[in-house]
Amino acid sequence: MTTHSSMPGHDIQAIIFERGVLRLLDQRLLPARTDWLTLDRSDEVARAIADLVVRGAPAIGIAAAYGAVIAAAQDGDDPEAWERRLEQLEQARPTAVNLAWALARMRRAAKRHGSPDPTMLEAEARGIHAEDVAANQAMAAAGSACIDAGSGVLTHCNTGALATGGIGTALGVVAAAYRAGKIRRIFAGETRPWLQGARLTAWELARMDMPFKVVIEGAAAALMASGQVQWVITGADRIAANGDVANKIGTCSLAVIARHYGVRVMVVAPSSTVDPDTPSGQDIAIEQRDPGEIWRAAGLDHTPPGFDAWNPVFDITPATLVDCIVTEAGVHHPPYRFAARDSIIGTP
C-alpha cells in the first residue's frame, strides 16, 4: 500500500481502478490534504472501507466491487478462498446495503462465468461504477425539479462525488438546483463526530464555487425556525421496503425538527440502496463504532479515564417524516411500497 499526493484532473473523483490496483482518495485527511492510497490486496480494501478512507454507501459498494476483482487476482483459482475474501469485504460496513448488493452482483457474475476471473469481474465492477455515474445524473435532474425557485437547503453528512462514483446523490440534487437558479441559500450541517459536512461537503461546495455556510449540529432548529431553509436533503445508507431510512446519525433529528417547522425532507439514493427484503427500519442493524472517536473529534488522542460514549453511526428516520425519496427511477412519494426491487427499477 502506498500513498500519493495531488488530485488528478479537475473533476472530483474518489475512486480510480487502474492496472489491477485501486486508488482511493483518503477522505480522513480532507480538506487539509489530498492524499491517495494505492491498494493491491482485498484485505487492504476492506480495511480502507472500515476505517472511512472511502465512505458513502454508493462509493463503498463500488470500492468493494473493485476489491472483489483484486481478490480474484489473488485467489481466482480457489473459489472458496475468493469467497472468504468477499466475506471480509462484506463485514467492513454492515449497515450500508450497497456493499452487500455490489458483492452479490460480483458473485453472480463469477457464477455465470464459472469461476472468479479477474478480467470478467473487472468489467462487472466497471459496469457498477458507470451505472452509478448515470444514476447520479438522473437523480440530480429528478430531485432538482421538486425544488421551488428561491429555496434554501440544509444538507447532512457528505453525499457528493466523494460518496459516489459520479456527481453525488443529495449534493448532486443541490448542485443541479443551484445551477438552475432555484437555490439561493446552502447550509452544510457539520455532522458529528467525523465532521463530514464541515470537512467534505464544504470542500466539494468550495471546489464547485457554490456559496454556502457551515452550521453546527445544534443550530439546525434555529436555522429552520428562521425560515431560511425549505428543504433538508440527505442521502441514505439503506432504505427499507416501507420507506424507513437508515442514514448518518442525526438525520432523524433533522427530520423531526423539519416536520415541526414545515420544512420538507428529501432523501436521495440509488435503487441499490433500497432493500426490499428489509420490511422496516426496525430490521436494520445499526453499526456501532469505537467510542474513542468521540474524544478524538474533540482533539484528544485517547479516551479520558472514566469516560465512555455511545457512538452509533446511523439512525432510522421513519418514512412518515420523509416527503419524497428520489432514485434514478424518479421521485417516490408516500406511502412507500418498495416490496420488490423491480418496483423501484429493473434488476440489473
Image (cartoon, helix red, strand yellow):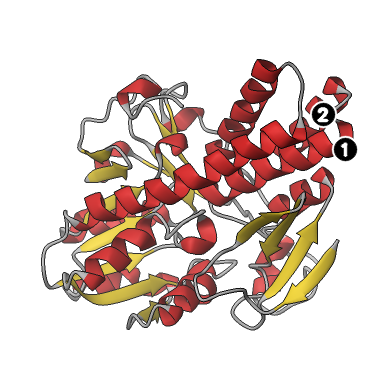
User: In the depicted view, which residue is nearer to us: 128 or 217?
Assistant: 128
Question: In front here: 8 or 267?
Answer: 8
Q: x, y percentage for residue 113?
A: 69, 19
Kindly state the secondary structure of the residue where label 1 is placed.
helix
Please tell me which residue is depicted at 80% across the width and 34% down the height of the picture. Answer: 72
Q: Are marks 2 and 1 in contact (CB under 8 Å)?
A: yes
Place of residue 263 in the rendered image (x, y in percent of width and height, measured from the top left): 19, 59
Q: How crowded is mark 2: few (under 14 residues within 10 Å), some or many (20 or more)?
A: many
Query: Callout 1: 10 Å neighbours few (<14), some, many (20+)?
Result: some
Residue 82 seen from this side: yes
User: Above or below — where is 154 with respect to 15?
Assistant: below
Asked which quadrant contains residue 208, the reply is bottom left
Q: Name the residue under label 2.
A: 82
Q: Quadrant of the rendered structure where residue 105 is?
A: top right
Residue under label 1: 74
Residue 13 placement (x, y as % from top left): 56, 64
Residue at x 78%, y 36% (from the top left corner): 88
How much space separates mark 2 and mark 1, taking CA atoms? 8 Å
Which structural element holds mark 2?
helix
